[in-house]
Amino acid sequence: MPTPSSEHVLRIFIVALCALFGACARKPPAAPPPPPPPQLTEWPKGVTPPLKITDQLTLQIPLQYERTAVEDGRGPRSPFAGIGGRTEARFDFFLADFSGYTLQNYRNELDENKVEILYLHAGDPHEADPGAPGEYPPNMLERSLREHLNPKDYRDMYGLRCYTSRVLSDRLTCYGRRDAAAGEDVLLYVPVAAAATSQNAFPTLKANYFSRKYGGVRIAWRTHVRNLPRWRDIDAQIWRFIDAWKVAGQPSAQPAKPPQ
């Protein structure tokens, strides 16, 4: 009968010890959970990392206007992600004084005073060419009048001409001059009175357009429909924010000359 090797004897000895004391079945104690983050007492301060929108526009947005600066009581985090290959900025503010977030107001998702900038990203510089696709308001209005709006059924209000649709719709399509100096317009989609006053509804108006500023950008924003009378103030304030948050040393927001 062959003599067991020393390695085999050692293995048998270790197995016997494990059976006797249960030492081999013991697992190291789990690491203690990390301590909870400190309770926030004010909205985080500072600005976001530089965000390049176009060659002429890089923004650093104050965290005061970024809802994503806090998440479940934790500290600041980066709110930005590329969408469809485009770098995109988003921010919010509140009427009536264009202030930002606090630890109180950010909990109310349905605040009627909130204005949300849904996106700000680069557009095609040729988007303002006559008849071009995209979000240049004169081209959008021309297409809409041809496809579904009723050019003879409209109402004028708050500096806008608001058209009804030839098909069933709960919104008006409103068109107006948003920046006289730049010669630029806006298209807004506004709930009709019945939709705006329906029960359990939070009716919002939405604006979107292409601007030649900063090499050509697309922008969209929304707010509660009750803020329609202030649409021009809201839009102008958005651009004041953009101009103020632009990284120093970049070209100014000179739009391309409108086509004659």
Image (spheres, rainbow, N blue to C red):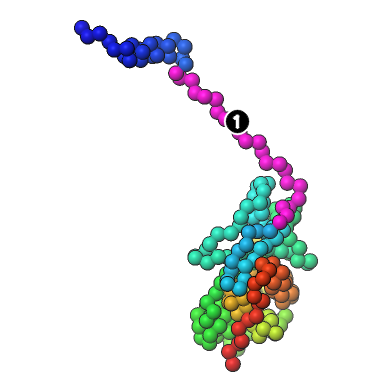
Is 41 in the magenta?
Answer: yes
Q: Quadrant of the C terminus?
A: bottom right
Q: Quadrant of the N terminus?
A: top left
Q: Is residue 15 left or right of residue 92?
A: left
Q: Which residues are magenta?
A: 24-46
Q: Please name the residue shown 67% across and 62% down the image.
A: 61
SS at mark 1?
A: loop
Q: Which residue type carries mark 1?
A: Pro
Q: Is residue 13 above or below residue 213?
A: above
Residue at the bottom extreme of this rendering: 260
Q: Nearer the viewer, residue 177 or 203?
A: 177
Q: Please name the residue shown 58% across and 68% down the image.
A: 53
Q: Is residue 24 left or right of residue 235?
A: left
Q: Nearer the viewer, residue 244 or 134?
A: 244
Residue at the top extreme of this rendering: 1
Q: Please name the residue shown 64% across and 75% down the image.
A: 251
Is 96 in the magenta?
Answer: no
Residue corresponding to mark 1: 32
Residue 75 place in picture, x, y as percent? 67, 48
Q: Main secondary structure of the magenta part?
A: loop
Residue 199 place in picture, x, y as percent? 66, 63
Residue 77 place in picture, x, y as percent? 63, 52
Place residue 67 in its image quadrant.
Answer: bottom right
Q: Is residue 16 visible?
A: yes
Q: Is residue 145 above or below residue 221?
A: below
Label 1 Cα neighbours within 10 Å, binned few <14 / some 14-19 / many ≥20: few
Q: Please name the residue shown 76% across and 63% down the image.
A: 99
Q: Is residue 47 above or below residue 25?
A: below
